Amino acid sequence: MNSYFPASLRRAVLAVVLPAMAVGALVACSETPAPAPAAATLPATSAPVTSAPVTETHMITNKSHRLAFYVTPGHQPAIVLDAGGGEDHTQWKDIVPRLAKATGSEIITYDRAGLGASDEVKGAWDVHAAVSDLQAGLHQLGVTGNVILVSHSQAGEVATYFVNKYPKLVSGAVLVDASLPQFSTDEQIERIIAVTTPQIEELKKQPSTKQTRQLIATAANYGPMHHAYHKVSWPSSVPATVIVSEKTPFDGSPQDAQHWRDAAAAFVNAAPGRTLVTAVGSSHEIPQDQPELVLEQIEKMVAEHG
């Protein structure tokens, strides 16, 4: 993006918590499905790591757009890694081969619509459409149950709606500094919108790119979407581990960082079967900062609930 657009704000909006970073201010993401056609398989896109199977690319179609899913073969449970806002499947590139080798599980990553090799979809970003895309991909890949869902940042919103709609499909989840319903209070939503609206309006004046279009689409429906999200509960039948970063997406704004941590704690305390883990010293980008911690918690979830 253009240099006028502050890197800290870019990063936060892409994480889809949409806070703007400024000194002293905000600082910086069951139903039985109908039969579907088999997924198309493309040549492998990543070279094998020692003792790890080759990852295959599958292009699946959902409601006239195509999405790229990347599958490392293995046994059940299937581990699905869902990247944060503005990120594609490569966010997990260093974790996938290690996770496959450690667990022997089938590992699935994918590019949400508008990211990576997946088609763009016009209009505001819609979490329900994202849930539909994920379900369609898993169904077409033949994954019908026993999923361990790993979700970073914005993907926490996808996960929350997904487990509500398909609770029997998911055996457990690891939420990595994820956006949780408890965070999106009326006050917090207003703060975020007030700071980011001028930046988004300026962005609209710049040359359009796939990245900027996705950023604008994410911001377009932020208020109504997150007011609704605040009312959604995670099913008590699906165990979850929440890994919260020490710095949070709001490093530099103690008030907002504390609200993020408090939301994680409130989520964990709302029902049994939930665990809170703090990534000490980590930024919001826990998969890159502390991959060992992420691997440890996924392996633990697989061992206990897979």
Image (cartoon, rainbow, N blue to C red):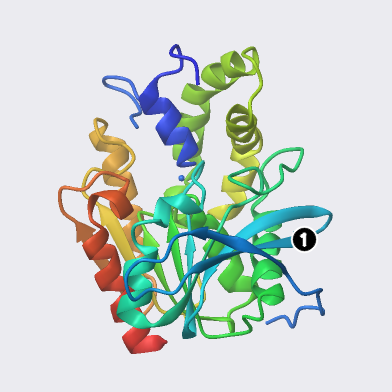
Q: In the rendering, at what x and y percent does residue 290 appear?
A: 23, 55
Q: In the rendering, at what x and y percent does residue 272 appear?
A: 35, 81
Q: Is residue 265 visible?
A: no
Q: Is residue 22 above or below residue 214?
A: above
Residue drawn at 29 percent across, 64 percent down: 294
Q: Amino acid at mark 1?
A: Thr
Q: In the rendering, at what x and y percent does residue 54 appear?
A: 47, 69
- Residue on which the image places disc 1: 61
Depth check: 76 or 12 in front?
76
Residue 121 position by quadrant: top right
Which element is circle 1 on?
A: strand
Residue drawn at 50 percent across, 67 percent down: 55
Q: How many marks?
A: 1
Depth check: 15 or 289 in front?
289
Residue 219 position by quadrant: top right
Residue extending furthest toward the left: 281
Q: Residues within 10 Å of mark 1 (few under 14, many from 20)?
A: many
Q: Is residue 221 above or below residue 290?
A: above
Locate residue 118 relative to residue 13 in the image: left or right: right
Depth check: 194 or 90 in front?
90
Locate residue 77 relative to residue 27 in the image: left or right: right
Residue 168 position by quadrant: bottom right
Q: In the rendering, at what x and y percent does residue 140 appear?
A: 71, 74
Residue drawn at 66 percent across, 21 percent down: 208
Q: Is residue 211 visible?
A: yes
Residue drawn at 61 percent across, 52 percent down: 112
The C terminus: image quadrant: bottom left
